[in-house]
Image: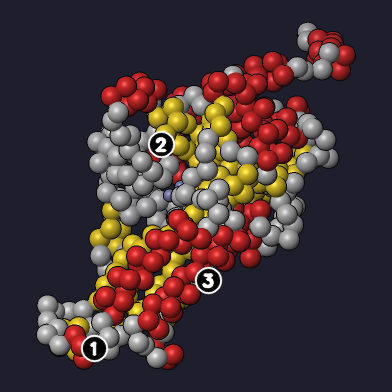
């Protein structure tokens, strides 16, 4: 006959001797090692079935099913293909954990047995290969692993989890669409929002943190430079927009080097210039496409104003009239910098260090790439956000690359492939510990 005495005894012991950090680590590590095999299968399946931005239909349905299985209240179709799961577990902090879901139009060349062979027909009717070349398949797997761990250990923490599976990160509209569709009004407003991005530069077994801005803001700018076209043999009867564009481009090089405060990093890149049709015709206009990167709103405004001032100044110097000033359009899309909350980074990275070891939680410099996670922290609700890098490089390859100076495949490369098992284990362990500590901090 069974007796209930041992259970009561254990509960009493737990009350008298609360769990220490070490006990938490052991509990988490047991959960994670039990989930790694199934997670590996899930990762490979997601990798073999990538979907482009705004087409994440099957992926979103799968994320919704997984959340449902874990006992979350699930809402689909939030801002397009977005999925939100809410798990209430007593009074305490509300923490949002976000993954992205979309893949890229890249033809995979990793040669791995689970490499993507998917192609789709795009809106122009062209066959496009699709690959999870930015690791969003890996993010989903680590996200699910962390949520499962927290659900299994739900008697060890109190609070509410908001699980967000976001579409369209690569086209930078997903987070904004989810916010516009009521992420912070239809669901509890998070105290904290957390996420990972897999790192192509850090070894598996580590995470990377950066207090303050970690990713740059980005804005695309289009410029149409006007001129007066004519015969290539008679330039004196024209105002050559190609020469004018060349002067504008050269002057743009002084925005960052001479105008922006040197301690504020920024980038102005002219990525495309197109004008003219033939050797001997001076065209009437030239089109340029630029990307600009910045870490503060002030620097953003300073760059935009300098782009206009320089273009107009050079156009006047070339002899163009007021109505023929260059046309500068910035569009409405704007990806702000990802501004990590320093206090949240400090709390979460300390928790990560307590389970991974200090040497495996690495402070990193900000990067000029962009991520639309920053928008979650830019609403009137002032949610504190933190994005962490999760080391994805096979350790042997990592040290080999340092020794031999070889390049590792970057994000968006057709050869990008994280070292699944150690990176997954590290990611789930570190994030579970960080979230449990945050939940138990209030
Ligand atoms: Zn990407
Ligand atoms: Zn990405």
Q: Position of residue 88 (x, y in %)?
A: 75, 43
Residue 41 against residue 243 in the figure, above or below? above
Pointer 2 residue: 200
Residue located beneath label 1 in the image: 238
SS category of the residue bearing label 1: loop
Distance Cα–Cα, label 2 vs label 3: 35 Å
Position of residue 76 measured from the top left corner of the image (x, y, whole percent)? 59, 57
Using a 10 Å C-alpha cutoff, classify the residue at mark 2 as few (fewer than 14 neighbours), some (14 to 19) or many (20 or more).
many
**Residue shown at 27%/89% (left/top)?**
228
Ranked by sequence position, the earlier of labels 2 and 3 is 2
- The residue pinned by badge 3 equals 305
Render colour scheme: secondary structure
Instruction: Give the residue at x 19% y 85%.
Output: 235
Residue 52 picture quarter: bottom left
Residue 77, visible in the rendered structure? no
Quarter of the picture holding the C terminus: top right
Q: Answer yes or no: disc 2 within 8 Å of ligand 2.
A: no
């Amino acid at each position: 006959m069974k007796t209930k005495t041992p259970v009561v005894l254990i509960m009493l012991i737990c009350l008298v001797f609360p769990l220490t950090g070490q006990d938490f680590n052991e509990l988490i590590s047991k959960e994670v090692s039990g989930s790694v095999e199934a997670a590996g299968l899930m990762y490979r399946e997601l990798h073999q079935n990538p979907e482009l931005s705004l087409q994440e239909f099957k992926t979103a349905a799968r994320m919704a099913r997984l959340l449902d299985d874990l006992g979350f209240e699930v809402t689909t179709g939030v801002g397009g293909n977005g999925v939100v799961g809410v798990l209430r577990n007593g009074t305490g902090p509300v923490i949002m954990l976000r993954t992205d879901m979309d893949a890229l139009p890249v033809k995979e060349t990793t040669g791995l047995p689970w490499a993507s062979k998917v192609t789709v027909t795009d809106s122009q009717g062209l066959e496009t290969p699709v690959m999870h070349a930015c690791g969003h398949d890996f993010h989903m797997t680590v996200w699910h692993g962390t949520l499962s761990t927290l659900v299994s250990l739900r008697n060890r923490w109190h609070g509410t989890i908001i699980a967000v599976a976001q579409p369209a990160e690569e086209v930078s509209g997903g987070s904004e669409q989810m916010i516009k569709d009521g992420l912070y009004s239809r669901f509890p407003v998070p105290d904290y929002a957390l996420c990972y991005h897999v790192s192509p530069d850090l070894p598996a077994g580590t995470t990377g943190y950066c207090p303050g801005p970690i990713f740059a803001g980005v804005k695309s700018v289009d410029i149409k430079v006007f001129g007066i076209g004519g015969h290539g043999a008679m330039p004196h009867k024209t105002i050559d927009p190609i020469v004018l564009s060349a002067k504008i481009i050269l002057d743009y090089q002084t925005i960052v080097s001479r105008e922006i405060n040197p301690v504020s990093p920024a980038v102005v890149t002219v990525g495309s210039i197109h004008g003219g049709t033939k050797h001997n015709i001076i065209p009437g206009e030239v089109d340029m496409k630029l990307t600009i990167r910045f870490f503060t709103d002030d620097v953003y405004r300073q760059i935009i104003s300098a782009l206009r001032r320089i273009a107009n100044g050079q156009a006047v110097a070339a002899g163009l009239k007021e109505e023929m000033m260059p046309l500068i359009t910035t569009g409405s899309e704007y990806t702000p910098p990802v501004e990590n909350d320093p206090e949240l980074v400090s709390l979460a990275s300390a928790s990560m260090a307590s389970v991974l070891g200090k040497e495996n939680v690495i402070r990193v410099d900000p990067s000029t790439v962009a991520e639309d996670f920053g928008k979650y922290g830019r609403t009137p609700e002032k949610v504190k956000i933190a994005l962490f890098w999760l080391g994805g490089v096979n350790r042997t390859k990592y040290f080999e690359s340092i020794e031999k100076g070889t390049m590792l495949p970057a994000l968006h490369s057709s050869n990008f492939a994280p070292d699944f098992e150690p990176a997954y284990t590290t990611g789930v362990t570190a994030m579970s510990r960080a979230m449990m500590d945050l939940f138990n901090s209030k």
